Image (spheres, grey):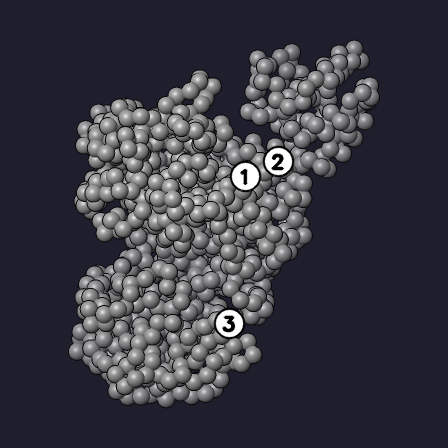
Amino acid sequence: MVDSDKARADYWHKVEEGLSGNTGSNESCDYYPCHHEGQDCTLCFCPFYPCLDDRLGTFVESRSGGQVWSCQDCLWIHRPDVGRAAKARLSGRGRPSHEELLAIKDELERSFKVKAERLMVMGATSGAGKTLMVAAICRILADKGMRVAPFKSQNMSLNSTVTPRGEEISRAQALQAQACRVEPEARMNPLLLKPKKDDISQVVVLGRPYKDMSVGTYYGGFTTGEGARVVREAFHHLELRFDAIVIEGAGSPAEINLAEADLANMLTAEITDSPCILVVNIEWGGAFAYAYGTLMLLPPEQRSRFKGVIINNMHGSAESVQKGIDELERLTGVPVLGVVPHIEHALPDEDSQGLEGRGNGGIKVGVIRLPHISNFTDFDALEIGGGASVSFIDSPSEVAAVDALVIPGTKSTVADLQWLRRQRLDRAIMDRRGEVPILGICGGYQMLGTRIEDPNGVEVDEGGSYEGLGLLRSVSRFDAYEKRTVRVEGRLLDGGEIRGYEIHMGTTETEEKPLFVLRSEEGERDEGSVSEDGMVMGTYVHGLFDLTSFRSRFLSLAGKGRESAEQIDYESAVEAGIAKVARIVSEHIDVDRLMRIMEEGA
Amino acid sequence: MKIMVLGVTSGAGKTTIAAMLCRHFARQGLRVSPFKAQNLSLNSYVTSTGEEIGISQAYQAWACGREPHWSMNPVLLKPHGERRMQVVLKGRPMMDVGPDRPMPREALLDAVKKAYLTVAGDSDIVVLEGSGGAAEINLFDRDIANMVMADIADAPVVLVGDIDRGGVFAGLYGAFMLLPPEWRGRVKAFIINRFRGDPSILGAGIEKLEELTGVPCAGVLPLYRLRTPAEDSLDLGRDRGAVDDMADVKQAWMRSLDQLHEASLEHLDYSLIERIAREGR
């Protein structure tokens, strides 16, 4: 406790040192980051100490035996926006009394929530449109000046990306973070399941591979024990740093055969004590049945968390369903917050959906539909930005008909290489050597080489050495259960910027020319392989089509100059998509009521 | 005898399951007919006498070993343009309907009743198929193809839910509970369709559903890949199998349906289905 006047004056002196110094993170401090990366260090000494606010700290036993106020886990004062605002309010005015200080804290609290408001968005089915509804709500709240974070406790997806800190998270949460205009971080998606084979998934915890688990092990104790603890801690961290958190559920919350172990839905709602809304897709019909059934199958204490229903993806006029809405509200007592129309947008697809060909551009890019295909959102940019049409193909005749070939990333390189041979796709691909560009990404790159060595059984239980397609003079090795997840920047050998991220196990040595030169703090390094004639390429870099340089190069090799003139930056296309979806959602749902639901809580 | 297949949503698998039931009864030597009062589809078939019907009913007729006839699908709605549809009645174009021109419901209903009597009079058993979701509470007063048709035919109903998109228990329970009690009484069994994985994990959910509704689950069908004709406009993107050479397509489809029926024998409680068709319960 800062009790004597002298002690108070000394303490305030340290506060003032902070106020007169630089704002932001103090990376030169020996203790940085004492809380978390990106923390604001302006108020290393908190002006409000001791605030005695039990949301931010607690009394602990002091070394001398008495009680002392401890706020070592308080993250609020380390929010960049709080740091800036407190500095503006306190600088150059001498030492306020403790009462004055607490009044200032109250005032700041009105703008910067001490504990985030929260809202959980559940879907009656998968594909209900949760992911984009969360992104839309994130953007709507961010536009109201709130600092918002997305959260999904557990995501099963093969489409992951890498945060600026090298953590692996689902691409959906990264997109939602972009909607919030904040940097994505692993806590926004603390558990990521990447299906590998049969019932085995790689479990990624807080952005790092944890271990491979079977469905039985995962749901037989992990979700309710260790998994729930990880989720609770990640959420707690976020709730002290943001004004609002918009949480996404997974699939349906009313899978009555799985209820106890269903971490991603009602268990997360309980851990985060969130009010919930239910999104139903009306496109297939049966929307009222799904909404009613979902609400009424939940036990009353869970049902009472639901404060609203959103009917999504409506084709035609909302008036035609008004009678159904009235009846649903009467039967369940839960209000319908709005009917959102079907929205045409070019945002990346959610999870495992959307392997159908979409674009209708002139250049036909064929992506081999590997059984364990991962990161297939890499190709969105070819369509959205490049005007090519991408199809996912699995027969030799299709391989023969495209203008460019890609062997994509996979969760199981060796198994998928064997599949490729069984489908006779290996011959079909080699037949096109020299005619069309052939690109291998990640696992596809490993397949293009001469050999894949797995002496310790990292890829395949028994381990072994496997012959590759031999289109590149390179050899890949899996020596240890280690995964590289990093964001990278660099350039093509003959110029042109590239940017992307690596997520892979295994390393590759090559006798070919490198495809890229990547920059990092350690200097420059070569990455990837390209054949003498430039037509066969391999790389570990995902997202490589996002910037125009490599995309143009690849499509020009494919289309012999037929490339579309309308090249646009992928990120600005995504940004435009988010803005559009948020605008249309805000026009069709009762936003004020949504804000009240968040204020009032569960 | 008769039995009617209704879905929680469109695309739940009604068409395929109805075709399988047609095949099942035909293989027992019964004279079977398919019947769908009203079909919303752009994929049509022209019968030997020159009438246009939904292509699914043509396939189902073949599954029964019968020649397709307009009475098996007396009303065909073909969407075109912005919120407009062509109404094909008894195989012949009748009129266009749209926001400014409502559906002539009474006339259609009258034709449907007569067509059903024709079909039923010429069959040992009729396998009826509904249209879209069975519990569209905003559309009950406009219904022709679902429970209103079940009333006309006095048919027992099996309700199909698609588990592939999740929430199947909610969908089945919700559809059942949103029906008015007298219609609810027509539902004699549930079918869970398009399941991937080990069905034993569904046990607890199925028991709960049966306990809550008093209706038995007749089976959990795995995700089959039948090269079906595209049922309605929603399915166009999903299944682009072109129907160029009808003879070849028909043969391939029949082989595929037979395989599917055989595979379904271990998943679907056909004795329950037969009893429902025979005794109405």
Q: CA distance from mark 2 to mark 3?
A: 45 Å
Q: Is residue A108 left or right of residue B82?
A: right
Percent of width and height locating residue A464: 19, 29
Q: Which mark is residue A242?
A: 2
The amino acid type found where label 2 is placed reads Phe
Q: Which mark is residue B83?
A: 3
Nearer to us of marks 1 and 2 is 1
Q: Are marks 1 and 3 on the same chain?
A: no
SS class of the residue under badge 3? loop
Output the chain of dot 2. A
Output the chain of dot 3. B
Nearer to us of marks 2 and 3 is 3
Q: Residue at x 59, y 14 (%)?
A: A29
Q: Is residue A600 left or right of residue B198?
A: right
Residue A410, by quadrant, is top left
Whether residue A513 is visible: yes
Q: Which mark is residue A177?
A: 1
Percent of width and height locating residue A4: 78, 13
User: Of residues A408 and A362, which is closer to you in this image?
Assistant: A362
Q: CA distance from mark 1 to mark 3?
A: 38 Å
User: Of residues A485 and A79, which is closer to you in this image?
Assistant: A485
Nearer to us of marks 1 and 3 is 3
Q: Quadrant of the N terminus of chain A?
A: top right
Q: Residue at x 48, y 71 (%)?
A: B81
